[in-house]
Image: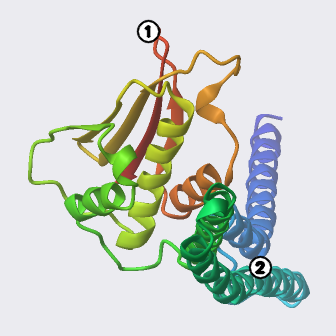
Amino acid sequence: MHVLLIEDDDLVASGLVSGLEMIGAVWFGISRGLAPLERLSREVSRRSPTMLTPVAIGSAPAELQPVVAMLNGLLARVNDAIQREQNFASQAAHELRTPLTAIKTNLQVAVRQAPEATQALDQAQAGIQRLQRIIEQLLMLARAERTGPQSDAQAATETVIHQAMMDLPERNRIRVEMIPSLPPLPPLPLPQPLASAALRNLLENALSHGTSSDTVELRVQHTIDAIVMTVTNQAADSPKPDPGYSDGLGLTIVRAITERFGARFEFRHPEDGRVQAVIAWPT
């Protein structure tokens, strides 16, 4: 009887080993079969919204290849649609430049020939200048969308600040107080015109929506992993619930540029009634 019990125990142990080996084989087969799907999931999850290049996961089983092909086809169609929209905006802006320049020239001639109509003509010129500014902003937005973080361009921070200041009208430039920063400042990871446009638009937003008598403060700081540009203005007394978040093409361009190049853009509201627009460029 004792020997039989030993034999029964051996049979049970052998069955358990066989069962574990079978479970291990099944688990290995399932894991190996799902590996391409897991690679596809990781590839899609780590992509940014602007990364529309085809998905590549290496060798994929025949069952998964149609899914990858359909996904790549969708990415290609989305990319083509975006490119068409960007090209349309750029071409439309370029086409509008020429007639606006001609109208502006004719208005200048009319001012000299009809002094009595100076006020009306000045208002017309101001409208033309505003339209030209909008067109330049549209072109800048199209450029920001076309230029991605894969670009190797870098911009000297001092040049970015200088150009942004020089692009402001003289009457606005003198209202900006630059807080000196400790040199040297590392370069920014994007083309200089885009970086200057982002900073200029923040300055213009602060100058437009702050009090007309107060200065706008521009502070640039170099932290461990970023260059932080802070534009501070005193909030106007007008009944605007959130002056910092005023909508407009300028801030749309700032958001497009910062998102495209991995920068953080936010508004802060200190207790003293000021508004701070902050861009943290990664270094």
Q: Is residue 141 above or below residue 235?
A: below
Q: Position of residue 271 (x, y in %)?
A: 47, 8
The residue drawn where x is 79% and y is 74% is 33
Residue positioned 73% across, 65% down in the render: 41
Q: Circle 1 is placed at which residue position? A: 272
Res 47 seen here: no
Q: Which amino acid type corresponds to the residue marked 2 in the rendered image?
A: Ile
Tell me which label, 1 or 2, sits earlier in the chain. 2
Dot 2: few (<14), some (14–19), or many (≥20) neighbours within 10 Å? some
Q: Nearer the viewer, mark 1 or mark 2?
A: 1
**Residue at horizontal 67%, vertical 62%?**
117
The correct choice, above or below, for 212 with respect to 173 in the image is above
Q: Position of residue 143 (x, y in %)?
A: 57, 77
- Residue under numbered circle 2: 82
Q: Residue furthest top?
A: 271
> Callout 1, which amino acid?
Asp
* Residue 42 or residue 151, whichever sits in front: 151
